[in-house]
Image (cartoon, helix red, strand yellow):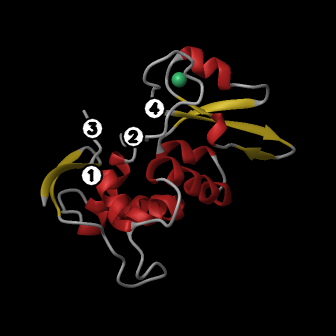
Amino acid sequence: MALVNVVIKGSNFPYELSGPYMFKSGKKAGQSVEALMFADHGYLVYLKNIADKNMASGSLPNRLHLHLAWVMRAGEFIKSSEECPYCSYDGERKKVEMFSVRYSYGGCSYGHRFTCCNEDECKYRVLEEKSKLFPLKFSSLAYFSNAEQKRLGAFFKDLFLGSGRLDTKKAFELFSSANPL
Ligand SMILES: [Zn+2]
C-alpha cells in the first residue's frame, strides 16, 4: 500500500493506492482499469472527462476518479524494457521511447521494427517517408481513431508487458513503477 499524490483540476489529493481498480458493475464489470488502459483507453478518458466535469469545486473525488487520475499520469512515465533496434554502437542498447507510424491509403501501420530510443541518430533512421514519430506514452493515443487506439493499445501492451495475456497484476505493478518527477 502506498500513499500517492493525485492532481485533479489543479488540486492535490492524497490517494491510498491499494491495488488495481476492478469495475464491479456497468459495461466493464469484472475488468480492471489497469487492463483497460491497454484494451480500451478511450473509454477511460471518457469516464475521466465526465468525472472531471461533474466534480463540483470543493468536493472530493471518488475512488474511481482518483484511480483514473493516478493511472493516466503514471502512463506518461512508465518505461518499456524493449531495446532500440537502431542503436548501432557496441555496449548497452537504449530502451524504446518512441514509435513510428506510417500513413498510407487512409490507414496506418507500426510495429516493433519501427520503434526507437530517444537519440536523434536512431530517430533519424526509423523515420521514413509518410511516417511520423510519437512518444511511447498513452497521451499519444489521442491522435488516433477509437478503433486504432485499441490496436495500438495491444501494441503498447507488448512493448511494456511483453507478449502473452494481459495480466492485471503485472499492469498494476508497471504503473506503480512509474516515477513522475
Ligand atoms: Zn537507439
Mark with earlier residue (2, 4) = 2
In three-dimensional space, the C-alpha distance between marks 2 and 4, rounded to whole angstroms, equals 8 Å
Camera-near label (3 vs 2) is 2
Q: Quadrant of the N terminus?
A: bottom left
Crowding near the residue tagged with mark 2, few <14, some 14–19, many ≥20 C-alpha atoms within 10 Å? some
Q: Earlier in the sequence, mark 4 or mark 3?
A: 4
| Kind of residue indicated by mark 1 | Ser
Q: Which residue is mark 3?
A: 180
Q: Secondary structure at mark 4?
A: loop
Label 2: which secondary element: loop
**Disc 1 to disc 2: CB gap under 8 Å:** no
Residue 40: in sight, yes or no?
Answer: no
| Residue at image mark 2 | 79
Q: Is residue 126 left or right of residue 4?
A: right
The residue pinned by badge 4 equals: 95
- Provide residue 9's location: percent of width, then percent of height: 29, 48
Camera-nearest label, 3 or 1: 1
Amino acid type at circle 2 is Lys
Disc 1 to disc 4, C-alpha distance: 19 Å
Distance from disc 1 to disc 2, alpha carbons, whole Å, reads 11 Å
